[in-house]
Amino acid sequence: MLTPVTQAGDTPAKPGNFITIDQRVLARVVGTVALMLPTVMIIAAFNPWLDTCYRASISHYYYAPFMGSFFIGALVFIGAYLLVYRGNKRPKLERYLSSAAGLFAIGVALFPTSGYGCDDTEFLGRAFTGFSVPNGAIVPAPILNAPLASYFQMIEFDVFGKTIGSDAIHYTCAAFLFAFLAWFSLRVFPVVDPEQRNADGTLTQQKITRNALYFFSGGVIIVSMMAMAASAIWDIPNWDAYKGTFWFETFALWAFGLSWMVKARFWGSWLNDQPT
């Protein structure tokens, strides 16, 4: 019989024929991916050899050659991890909300935002281009007279008389994803287990440190969400000029990555409980 699965808090699952999985290692990997996603995009934005541009948001890198594949792969990986994450506190609620967050992460990847999001006078981009096969032709030809916006909108459909595009699905998935990630940082990760207390009942210093980092991460995600929501409602001066959405998405993803790295005890004894 193989070793049973290990949960995020090192609580063994019921014995069975399962492959050994250390969820702290997986949490460390997903945290690293979350930290690297915006970091790679920043490097791409300011690296002249990559021939891309400084886009309005991280989501707009969907349309960048190569960077778009990295964007999709990172989000699908994060989504897949959240789908299989089980945790060990409030099992059903944590499991269901984690799975929902995983679906929303995959939704962000599969349904891109709209617009090219680039101010450069020349740039490379992946776009949705229509093709037609003229009578007697063998090779399809692109339809070049389509509106420019259609090249940067994957789908559009009517709902109760209103036109809805993939960008609406993208924004909805992103909002729920960040909300669930904030919930994990603020409500799930800070829960105290018995081994995280000293003999006198007080919290270990390591748990206090971890909770401070969790609350900081959750707060950054909430503030980033509020800032991006405000930009969608009001015309904030210089928001587009300073790429406000790009940077607040970056801050939220870094905060998400930090909280999961803390959950994985990435810094070893500094974060591992040592009751006194």
Image (cartoon, rainbow, N blue to C red):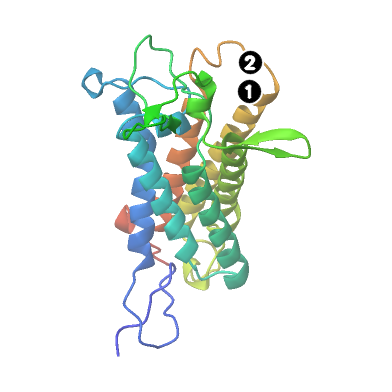
Q: Quadrant of residue 54?
A: top left
At 43% from the left and 31% from the top, the residue drawn is: 132
At 48% from the left and 45% from the top, the residue drawn is: 110
Which mark is first along the chain, 1 or 2?
1
| Whether residue 122 is situated above or below residue 16 in the rendered picture | above
* Extreme residue in the bottom direction: 1
| Whether residue 167 is situated above or below residue 179 in the rendered picture | above
Percent from the top left, x then y, of residue 13?
44, 81
The disc placed on residue 231 is 1
Residue count near mark 2 (Cα–Cα under 10 Å), binned few <14, some 14–19, many ≥20: few
The disc placed on residue 236 is 2
Relative side of 54 to 106, left or right:
left
Tell me the quadrant of the picture where the C terminus can be found.
bottom left
Relative side of 200 to 158, left or right:
left
SS state under label 1: helix
The disc placed on residue 267 is none
At 38% from the left and 74% from the top, the residue drawn is: 6
Q: Are marks 2 and 1 in contact (CB under 8 Å)?
A: yes
Name the residue type under label 1. Answer: Ser
| Whether residue 195 is situated above or below residue 113 in the rendered picture | below
Given residues 247 and 223, the one toward you in this image is 247
Name the residue type under label 2. Answer: Ile
State whether residue 128 appears in this view. no
